[in-house]
Amino acid sequence: MPPQSAAAIGSARMTAFPFTFAHHPDGHDFAASAQLASEADTLALGARIAGALAPGLNIWLEGDLGSGKTTLVRGILRALGHAGPVKSPTYTLIELYVVSRMILYHFDFYRLANPEEFLDAGLDEYFSGTGVCLVEWPRQAAPCLAAPDIIITLMARNDGRRATIQAKTEAGRICIHQLTDRTISQRTAPPG
Ligand SMILES: Nc1ncnc2c1ncn2[C@@H]1O[C@H](COP(=O)(O)OP(=O)(O)OP(=O)(O)O)[C@@H](O)[C@H]1O
Ligand SMILES: [Mg+2]
């Protein structure tokens, strides 16, 4: 069998996702959700997100211990060409990646003693630049943490996971529209 191109593999994976949409025409809120039957699906969702990233996005990753947050980050980084390991920054708080001319910061604040520790470590500076921030356990750093553009929540469902992706800003909404193959003109118009 001839080798498939990366694009062909990507589009094959994309058709496997049953995305559904929720419209909130009065604000920036816009949500998509997907059922992820296996780790491979979580990695594939990461690959879709990778293709829709824009500089400076602040993405919060929520969900219980072991819900797949780091796996999703691994999927994003692999799709961007990072071949090395993606370690959970549970103890280091931050891991830095430079891939595809983009800077990504992967945070894990599970072990943050208090939000002030976030400020004392100077981590707030990473959220004001052009790097993409992917944040596990963001509420451990709130209220010191910048508001998110997107919140992704992973929940155990049967043997797999349910992912909900919610936009909180216009930049987040554009990203979700891209990853769900929707155009902005398809957005529900506000009443009146
Ligand atoms: N869709 C899925 N279905 C089943 N298992 C999955 C799925 N996605 C990821 N997993 C598995 O879940 C386990 C935990 O994943 P991961 O370490 O990414 O979780 P996490 O949310 O980052 O956890 P923590 O909060 O401890 O950092 C891994 O064994 C991974 O293979
Ligand atoms: Mg993790």
Image (tube, rainbow, N blue to C red):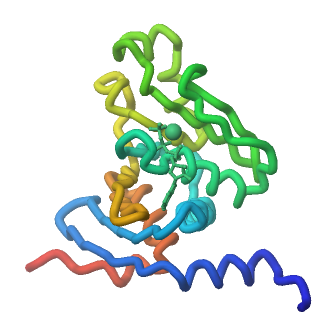
Q: Residue furthest top?
A: 120
Looking at the rendered image, the quarter that the N terminus falls into is bottom right
Name which residue lies at 46% across and 75% down: 180
Name which residue lies at 42% across and 27% down: 110
Left or right placement of residue 26 versus residue 46 in this view: left
Name which residue lies at 38% across and 13% down: 113
Quarter of the figure with residue 43: bottom right
Q: Position of residue 115 (x, y in %)?
A: 35, 17
* Position of 98 relative to 157 (above/below): above
* Position of 28 relative to 177 (above/below): above
Q: Position of residue 13 (x, y in %)?
A: 61, 78
Left or right placement of residue 24 versus residue 182 in this view: left
Q: Position of residue 153 (x, y in %)?
A: 36, 52
Q: Residue furthest bottom?
A: 1
Left or right placement of residue 10 versus residue 143 in this view: right
* Position of 63 relative to 11 (above/below): above
Name the residue nearer the viewer: 6 or 91: 91
Left or right placement of residue 83 versus residue 22 in this view: right
Name the residue nearer the viewer: 89 or 151: 89
